[in-house]
Amino acid sequence: MSKTNVRKQALERSTSFKDTQKILNQNFFHNKIFKKVYPIGLQKSTSSLSLSSVSLSLSQNSNDSSQADSLTPLDERISSALRLISASSHERRETAVAKTIHQQSPLVTTEPGELRRCNWITKNSDKLYVEFHDECWGVPAYDDNKLFEMLAMSGLLMDYNWTEIIKRREPLREVFAGFDPYTVAKMEEQEIIEITSNKALSLADSRVMCIVDNAKCIMKVVRECGSFSSYIWSFVNHKPIINKYKYPRNVPLRSPKAEALSKDMVKRGFRFVGPVIVHSFMQAAGLTIDHLVDCYRHSECVSLAERPWRHI
């Protein structure tokens, strides 16, 4: 085999490696978004095309006995670089797996007399976030304004995590008229500009317009279905879904019900209502009870969910 052919093969391998690295970087970006949506360690599926396996196969091919005598100094440097990347990638993957196992550990130490909460509530959790978990998250909501508020807050998960959103909760209620969809739907350009310039909220124009546009969609739903609540709850047969998850890793980021609701909302013109966002909305609004079974709020929310459904 000529030196020209060997160099050509080395360049092809380098291009394939760069494409693989690009794919892995895109997956890492999506995982960062998911961590905002739900503060637990994510289950990572084992890919048959890992960085280390690609690098290892390339380095093995580079060491093929039929090519050993024809390698140029450039080819040898490329091969050495791939071996180093393979080794470092293997070390990083082992570290990531160890961290994931540690995060998913079901053991949570609690002081005597202390309430046992979901594993993602820790001693370092913000006080407002803990209050939101204890008083709001998972409680069935039937009021249109309440549901609109939960939908708007869930939509902000594209930019912030729950703690950051909850800290903005009162200012959000103030500028959006208590999340009255009738009032928000009538907001004009000047009011929208004032909200976007509010430093306490730090909301982009697109996020504010999204909330206003969704309010307009809610008003259309009210005219068709009688209320936004009746429309939303019809997707779970007007009864909360009661789950019995034991570990954080069991709690899904999306569900078939969320996908069905998301698809219908998109058709109706709602914005920022993908399946992951909608599932977070369903969790917060109590359409699905996703407190862990050993959390003290699980039984309380279940008792609320099992009472006769009553439309408000």
Image (tube, grey):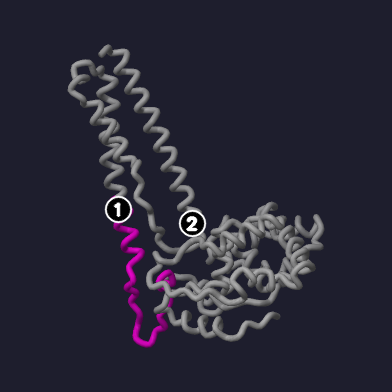
Screen quadrant of the C terminus? bottom right
Q: Which mark is residue 153?
A: none
Q: Residue at x 70, y 52 (%)?
A: 205
In which image quadrant can residue 305 be found? bottom right
Position of 72 with respect to 299 (left or right) is: left
Q: Is residue 274 visible?
A: yes
| Residue 76 at x, y percent in the picture | 25, 23
Give the main secondary structure, helix, strand or loop, of the magenta stretch.
Answer: loop
Residue hosting label 2: 34
Q: Nearer the viewer, residue 272 or 82?
A: 272
Label 2 neighbour load within 10 Å: few <14, some 14-19, many 20+: some
How many numbered circles does the render carry? 2
Q: Is residue 127 visible?
A: no
Query: Does the magenta portion include 20?
Result: no
In the rendered structure, which segment of residues is drawn in magenta? 94-123
Q: Amino acid at mark 2?
A: Phe
Screen quadrant of the N terminus? top left
Q: Residue at x 36, y 46 (%)?
A: 47
In which image quadrant can residue 97 be found? bottom left
Position of 11 with respect to 151 (left or right) is: left
Q: Nearer the viewer, residue 222 or 121?
A: 222
Q: Earlier in the sequence, mark 1 or mark 2?
A: 2
| Residue 42 at x, y percent in the picture | 41, 58
Q: Which mark is residue 95?
A: 1
> Do labels 1 and 2 touch, CB within 8 Å?
no
User: In the displayed structure, would residue 94 be above or below residue 41?
Assistant: above
| Residue 294 at x, y percent in the picture | 39, 79
Q: Amino acid at mark 1?
A: Thr
User: In the displayed structure, would residue 112 be above or below residue 230?
Assistant: below
Q: Residue at x 34, y 86 (%)?
A: 112
Which residue lies most toward the bottom here? 113
In which image quadrant can residue 89 be found? top left
